[in-house]
Image: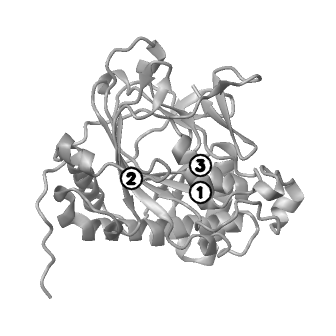
Amino acid sequence: MPTKVQQPLKAYIPPPPTKEDLDFADLSVIDLSKASTPEGRSELALQIHKALRDVGFFYAINHGYTSAQTARVFDIASATFDLVSDEEKRDYTGKDTSVYRGYKPRKAWIIDPGVRDEIENYAVHRNVTAQDHPAILRPFLPELAAFTRHNHDNVLQSVLRLLSLSLELPEDTLTKLHDFEAAVSFIKYHPRGECDAPEGNNVWLKGHTDIGTVTILYSQPIGGLQILSKDNKWRWIKHIDDALVINIGDGIEYLSGGYYPATRHRVIQPPVDQRNIPRLGVFYFAMANDSVKLSPLDHSPLLQKEGIKKYFDANMVPTMEEWRRERTSRYGRSELKPSATEERVEEERIRGTVIKHFN
């Protein structure tokens, strides 16, 4: 059988990890290879329970993607930004602000008064042929399709089974709610120029929670990602070769009745020895099925025992699609108001529940 020949592509060469002495968060390392047996899943469910209750992030290793495959995806991600002209990018910029599809250009979001973002996104629908792509990407669509499928089948489904077990539910509870509603995003954080607001130079993406259920980030060496710890301190996320950095979003918080709070995180200027280097990210943002109501899984024995928080009035509970569209259309565009109870926190209200933005 002939070997499949990959299309040639310029290699993305990442810089070395920072040597700065930073305050790194202490994250659990979950070995997904153990998820192949019931005994292994029981062990990992306990680890994930502790990780999400104590910190909110964890690393996943042995997830089935090789170093070479990971490097190849970063090559494709880099080409998406560096080998496409500004004119062609405009042709593939998403027109509907309630849907992530195609390019999001720099300066579309407000970071601070008078300060706009320097972040480029390129979002790919789970069905990669459901949208048009710039010419440079078209030869690589089969690889992107395989990448999305790997993340869904081999990573997300494993994590969802472990989450279900950790809530004392049948392990297919959450997998049944996730058919294939997700998007791959390539994100390039460009170094900020000088601006009038000093904080705007330092904070590249305000502290926030993710919209969906589970976020899968392919670890890369340029620092900047931070988590807001329980002691209210921002701590850096350390790079681990070939690891995934996984966190949960609004969807899991609402489905778990607040038992697993969505992870609060931000992106700031990289450490001094990586300053002025663009930061390239490869993400898989998972969502529950569009029709899933974001109300608590109140048949969970654990939640019945620990208590269940309801975020919405009965007649205002959004579906995943409604929540995704509302938050996506508002992000970086809506007017935020200072919190009356927390310093350096801004708020907005969606469907009667408060969404916080941390700075």
Residue displayed at 64% across by 57% down: 47
| Lower sequence index among marks 2 and 1 | 2
Q: Amino acid under label 2?
A: Ser
Q: Amino acid under label 3?
A: Glu
User: Picture quarter containing residue 168?
Assistant: bottom right
Q: Is residue 248 visible?
A: no
Residue 314 vs residue 21: left or right?
right
Residue 93 vs residue 246: left or right?
left
- The residue to which callout 2 is attached is 185
Determine whether label 2 and label 3 are within 8 Å by CB: no
Q: Amino acid under label 1?
A: Thr
Q: Is residue 323 visible?
A: yes
Residue 307 point in image, percent of width and height: 87, 54
- The residue to which callout 1 is attached is 213
Quarter of the figure that contains the C terminus: top right
Secondary structure under tag 2 reads: strand
